[in-house]
Image (cartoon, grey):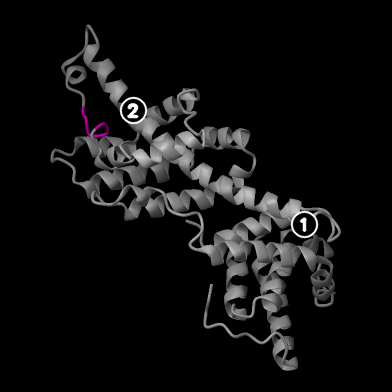
Amino acid sequence: MLNRRHIRIKVMQSMYAFKGTESDDLIKEQKFLLHSLDNMYDLYLSLLALLTELHKKSKNHNEKLQKKLLGTAADKNPDLKFQENQLLNCICSNTMLKDVISSHKLNFWDLEFEYVDILFKEILKSDIYKEYTKEEEVPTFKRDKQFVLDIFTEIIAPNEKLFDFFEDKKLTWVDDLPVVNTAMLKVLRKLKLTSPETALLPELYKDEEDKEFAIELFKKTFLNNSKFAEEINGKTTNWDSERLASLDGVLLKMALCEFQKFPSIPHKVTINEYLEIAKEYSTPKSSYFINGILDKIVKEYQADGVHIKTGRGLM
């Protein structure tokens, strides 16, 4: 589910939150990082559980309409496209998913029903829903999937009340939402009617190598924090020192760690990754600042023949 950029972002967040020194408890900080990464999977499962609750809500909504004593003809024959959505039915009928959600104790939406109600009402009044339900032909799986992708992208993901709820539920989830939302869309886009139940339950890491990368990047940046800071300071005499105390300083230290401690990752790959992260998470000028410093450092390494790379483009 996570790619190397996602891992770098989580390490960056952990390093930025850490205010101690190399003498502090590395094992404790490392456990916090891994726990934080595991919590991302719980957030992913929580969002899938939310989709199942919205689907259940559509069924209950239609049943109430049909039971109204003074209901209109439209009430007696409500549109069932949401209720019969093939992708949502695949998610809701996935027994493996149900078991994992239950074992992780993430089936809390029945107690937090106000958020389900808010989102359901937003969906019903949206143009996305109106266009979906006015289509006369029976929707294909592809059309049903697009409807779910649209409501997730346009209504669920940007909802501020849901954002506040996740912030109260688990503080680290706020930073994780953009990454998890992207992972969710990626999984849903790939889903087919014939997909096995495991398709909704991807592994958190692509492989053990990626998990090891997360641990080693954090550990080696953590243990060489002062050394990397000193090297960076020597290249930034004309820059505001406050910038190095910000997220930019963390990104530079992590990049130096990859330069020096990860010989299989090319300099260019490292620079590109941290420039993209800076564009998303730091100030508008950060990517220019970081690019200038890293470019200077790489040229010095190459001139001195140190920290030679052996990789072929590994991310």
Q: Position of residue 300 (x, y in %)?
A: 74, 87
Q: Position of residue 237 (x, y in %)?
A: 85, 74
What range is drawn magenta here? 79-83
Q: Position of residue 172 (x, y in %)?
A: 63, 44
Q: In the figure, residue 56 lies in which quadrant? A: top left
Residue type indicated by callout 1 = Leu
Up the image or down, 21 lies above or below 262; here it is: above
Element assignment for label 1: helix
Res 277 seen here: no
Q: At 22% across and 47% down in the image, what residue appears? A: 141
Up the image or down, 17 lies above or below 239; here it is: above
Q: Position of residue 76 (x, y in %)?
A: 18, 17
Q: At 66% across and 53% down in the image, what residue appears? A: 33
Residue 3 within the magenta-colored segment of the rendering: no
Considering depth in this image, is 26 or 135 the residue closer to the camera?
26
Q: Which mark is residue 26?
A: 1
Main secondary structure found in the magenta portion: loop
Q: At 69% across and 49% down in the image, what residue appears? A: 32
Residue type indicated by callout 2 = Lys
**Relative to 135, 164 lies left or right:** right
Report the residue marked by disc 2.
56
Considering depth in this image, is 114 or 45 the residue closer to the camera?
45
1 or 2: mark nearer the eye: 1
User: Gap in Å between the C-alphas at discs 1 and 2?
Assistant: 45 Å
Q: Which mark is residue 115?
A: none
Pointer 2 local density, CA inside 10 Å: few below 14, some 14–19, many at least 20: some
